Amino acid sequence: MAIFLGIDTGTSGTKAVLIDQSGKLLASELIEYALSTPRPQWAEQHPDTDWWQAAIKAIQGVLAKAGVSGSDVVGVGLTGQMHGSVFLDKSHQVLRPALLWCDARTGAECAEITELLGGAQGCYDILGQPVFTSFTAPKVLWVRKNEPAVYEKIAQILLPKDYIRFKLTGEFAAEVSDASGTSLFDVRQRTWSKVALDKLGIPSEWLPRVVESPEQTGVISAEAAALTGLKAGTPVVGGGGDQAAGAVGCGVVSTGQVVSSLGTSGVVFAHSDTAAIDPQMRVQTFCHAVPGTWGQMGCVISAGGSLRWYRDTFAEGLGYDAITAGGASAPAGCEGLLYLPYLAGERNPYFDPDARGVFFGATLRSTKDYFARAVLEGVSYAFKDLFTLFAEMGVPVSEIRASGGGAKSPFWLQMMADVIEKPHVLLNIDEGPALGAALLAAVGTGAYSSVPEACAATVSTRPGAEPDAMQSKIYSRYYPTYRALYPALATAFKSVASATEGTP
């Protein structure tokens, strides 16, 4: 049976998965790396020494685990963290570490781009969404302003997974779902925006050609084959940004299906057959990895990342299971102790890079377990914000498919169902974006005629968590206070950001 490889260039590591044509997971391999934060609000990684070296090891490792040869792999799909900027010179060498999606240094550039595009209405008309620090275009302008010697040498700009494509195939290409998050792309027309490029003064030749997600973009080169163990000539398809590919891996390919992904960042992604864009631009509309469709998406920047931060800062030596077990001993609502998960600013619904993480309502009764539970509850409330926006927009939600590392915690999954007040189902295989990338490779190499057909044949669900009415009632008492905290603190957030600006 044919075997397909999916590679996910994530924020905390690179994952490789192998599946057969039935969707059976043959093996998975994760190679982790660090996040560099040289200054407040900065986040960087090196495309070669972090991502590419991890990709080589992950591919070698997953082949060894599955006990298969690279020649058994029929197709390769790519996915990864969105928005990050890889700058190459004319010799295709990396010019500087990539600025990542969670890098929030570009507030001034976002304002500049918004003005150049004609304000909020112009952004809506040209891009279909606001400009935010996560996105790629502000990073390009930041380099132009602050690192002119680097900017003068730029010959190519790539997104994270597309750098791995280049290293695997020698080809420059992007695909529509990932390109949607650059602030340089027309999501309605599914192409680079000439208007945006002209107004921002960014040469179009710096950007790669753009394709639909299952489309073949190149083949494994002899050099990459020697490094990874793959067979030279193996097709590599477009793939998808991590959220679109993750939606494919969860089978979210028809209206009403929604994936709630609780990873380092948190995302709610709803399939749509039309490019329906919120006029208030509180959520994004990106192209889906299913050709000719779109997705409404909201993001919690520090979701699982909040729990990781809590562990590393306050619970060193404890595992996540121990932390959540402690949190389970605290009462629902933590007697009013609330947590805002804005450790790296927040995207939806506020689009505020200056927002900060906050614990509010601590008392002498607030133990370490209260704080642990408050972190879990705060992230869950942030997800409820996204579902509240979807309800206001009229986005249909008939089924929530839970994904990501957080969904593997029965306690946190139940909390999510209780806070959001909707059932959550689990998946037969939860390998997230990497699985979706492998399925896109199966479609692109002809194993399936379409992405929906591939998902119908390989993805199934099982019971997850039903809302508990009593718990939901408790959370509904505290949620309005949670919602009120950001507006009350927004001015203070900006004051803190101003005070720390330029701090080494």
Image (cartoon, helix red, strand yellow):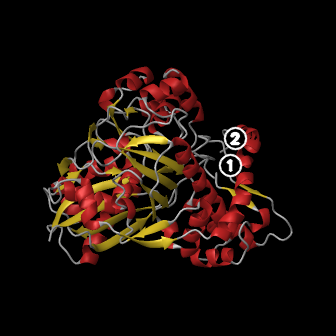
Of residues 493 and 95, the one drawn nearer to the viewer in this rendering: 493
Q: Taking 206 as reference, is 503 left or right? A: right
Q: Residues within 10 Å of mark 1 (few under 14, many from 20)?
A: many
* Residue 282 lies in quadrant: top right
Is label 2 in contact with label 1 (beta carbons under 8 Å)? Answer: yes
- One can see residue 220 in this view: no
Mark with earlier residue (2, 1): 1
- Where is residue 68? Give x, y as percent: 19, 74
Q: Is residue 35 left or right of residue 250?
A: right
**Residue 356 bears which disc, if any?**
1
Q: Is residue 139 left or right of residue 348?
A: left
Q: Residue 101 appears at what percent x and percent y?
A: 49, 47
Q: Is residue 22 above or below residue 50?
A: below
The answer to whether residue 407 is seen in the rendering is yes
* Residue at image point 25% right, 76% down: 66
Q: Which residue is labeled 2 in the image? A: 497
